[in-house]
Image (cartoon, helix red, strand yellow):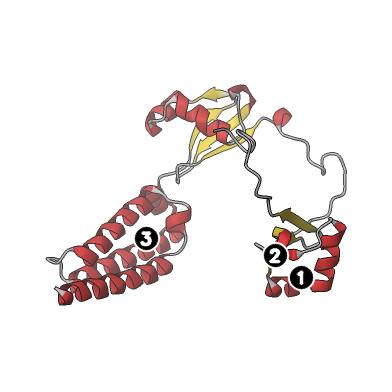
Amino acid sequence: MENVIGYTIMRAVIVYVLALILARMMGRKLISQMTFFDFVVGVSMGSLVANAMVDPSNSSSTSVISLIAISILTIAVAFINTKSFNFRKLTDSEPITIVENGKIVEENMKNTRMTVSELMMKMREKNAFSLADVEFAIMETDGQLSVLPKADKKPLTPAQMNIKTTSEGLMKDVIIDGNIMNENLKSTGMDENWLNSELKKQGIQNISDVFYAGVYANKKLHVSRKSNNENEKHGQYGME
């Protein structure tokens, strides 16, 4: 019994590590922007990994060979996709226009098997609450809906109003749950003295009172304090 348990654990660890390595080789696209082909590959990989871990009738060598074969196939298809538009169209399909100039393209709706309710839900997710405000809505190959508002419905930008702006850059974490991220703080060119000074300007005397703090590229500090232990009032932070 102990031999079986030990063998199963060892097999699971080996297959898990192998799957991580192969998934890393295939790239992030498999989980970030899943097309139909990526979905098939993901399901196949999951089934192979599960069988390799727990199915005693399935030999380890067979599972490993299958995993490697699927990975090579995925990498090969990705490479061919970059070289051939027709092949990419065959494996990943192509974007489909669902709404054009405020009108639903019924034929394309039928082809994508999408209902009007689903379309409206996806549009609301893109902050488009009216068909009349949409110039184009396109179903991408990964199932996401891209929406282009009509020109007169787009929000004004500083550039359109001739207002000069400065970029804040990316925010770097400098305090998480009361602990200073020294490496991140150093990379901003600031030190703890500067950090403490900025916190005091915001009425915070102790770093342990800070749940999160981040610094923008323009040296602006954003702080989120730790909440006190008072009971949350019903509906205070969301619908319940």
Where on the picture, by quarter, is residue 5? Answer: bottom left
Q: Is residue 156 above or below residue 70?
A: above
Residue topped by disc 1:
188
Residue topped by disc 2:
175
Going 34% across and 68% down the picture, which residue do you hit? 19
Quarter the N terminus occupies? bottom left
Going from N to C along the chain, the mark reached first, 3 or 2, is 3
On the rendered structure, is 64 left or right of 118? left
Going 24% across and 73% down the picture, which residue do you hit? 11
At label 3, the amino acid type is: Val
In the picture as drawn, the residue positioned furthest to the front comes out as: 230
Other-residue count near label 1 (Cα within 10 Å), few / some / many at <14 / 14–19 / ≥20: some
At label 2, the amino acid type is: Ile
- Tags 1 and 2 in contact by the CB under 8 Å rule? no
Report helix, strand or loop for mark 1. loop
Q: Say which of 222 and 156 sits in front.
A: 222
On the rendered structure, is 39 left or right of 3? right
At label 1, the amino acid type is: Thr
Q: Position of residue 161 (x, y in %)?
A: 86, 39
Q: Would you say residue 190 is visible in this rendering? A: no
Going 71% across and 64% down the picture, which residue do you hit? 208
Residue topped by disc 3:
77
Mark 1 and mark 2: Cα distance apart in space: 13 Å
- Which-is-in-front pick, marks 3 and 2? 2
Report helix, strand or loop for mark 3. helix
